[in-house]
Image (cartoon, rainbow, N blue to C red):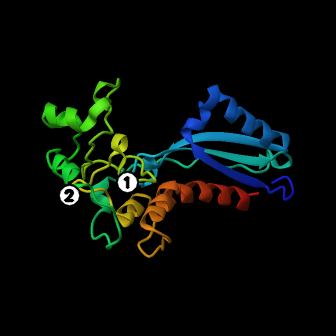
């Protein structure tokens, strides 16, 4: 950026960047951008507000070169009124690779109703499955979590089967496939992911939802065109 000095830049990260190291990490990044001659606007977006069937918060910083401040205006995209849920995106999903649960875990998940989690199964089974997690504080709502077709996905992760962040399929006792996760991230069905199954899950999970990216990029484009 220092060499090219673009009119505008976009920086994206997780919302937790704001609080990391008591806010010092974010402040350091902001200071670097400002020292390079940019005025920066920071927003936190929930992808669910922009036609994405997923609750996924992302921090986006948009910087305008100081000599263009007052000449270049970039609006914040307006949230969409209609909110998508999994029912809207899990129809006719093309076949793709996906991991499976162990037989033991699959049988336990068959006890969990759509939209439920560990509190919705017999206590002795949940306690045996959760082991030391049983004694942890907090709601632990990510453990044995089964999604519902009538809700958005939780944040799509890079690994589909972690004990404390389960996202079981609403209708089948299994994790989402690569292509189902890609639907939750708004990728078109003909988009190709490369490498091993694990690498494909990681590529999908690390991405910014396509529709959210489009909405922010469209406002940047409109601002540049309107100069």
Q: Which mark is residue 132?
A: none
The residue sitting at 35% across, 63% down in the picture is 180
The residue sitting at 63% across, 25% down in the picture is 22
Location of the C terminus (image quadrant) = bottom right
Instruction: Pick whichever, 100 or 172, lies toward us.
Output: 100
Per the image, the residue denoted by label 2 is 172
Percent x, y of residue 11: 66, 49
Percent x, y of residue 169: 26, 55
Pointer 1 local density, CA inside 10 Å: few below 14, some 14–19, many at least 20: many
Number of labelled discs? 2
Tell me the element at label 2: loop
Pointer 2 local density, CA inside 10 Å: few below 14, some 14–19, many at least 20: few
Q: Is residue 96 visible?
A: yes
Position of 212 compared to 82: left or right? Answer: right
Q: Which mark is residue 160?
A: 1
Position of 194 compared to 116: left or right? Answer: right
């Amino acid at each position: 950026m220092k060499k090219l000095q673009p009119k505008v830049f976009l920086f994206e990260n997780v919302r937790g960047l704001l609080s990391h190291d008591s806010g010092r990490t974010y402040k350091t990044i902001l200071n670097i951008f400002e020292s390079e001659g940019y005025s920066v606007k920071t927003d936190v977006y929930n992808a669910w507000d922009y036609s994405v069937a997923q609750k996924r918060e992302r921090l986006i910083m948009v910087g305008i070169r100081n000599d263009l401040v007052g000449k270049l205006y970039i609006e914040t995209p307006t949230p969409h009124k209609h909110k998508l849920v999994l029912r809207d995106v899990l129809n006719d999903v093309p076949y793709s690779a996906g991991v499976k649960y162990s037989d033991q875990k699959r049988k336990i998940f068959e006890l969990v109703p759509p939209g439920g989690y560990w509190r919705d199964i017999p206590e002795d089974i949940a306690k045996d499955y959760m082991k030391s997690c049983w004694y942890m504080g907090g709601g632990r709502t990510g453990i044995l979590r089964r999604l519902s077709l009538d809700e958005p996905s939780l944040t799509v992760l890079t690994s589909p089967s972690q004990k404390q962040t389960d996202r079981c399929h609403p209708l089948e006792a299994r994790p989402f496939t690569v292509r189902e996760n890609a639907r939750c991230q708004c990728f078109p069905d003909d988009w190709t992911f490369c490498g091993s199954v694990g690498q494909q899950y990681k590529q999908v999970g690390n991405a910014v939802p396509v529709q959210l990216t489009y909405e922010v990029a469209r406002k940047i484009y409109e601002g540049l065109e309107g100069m």
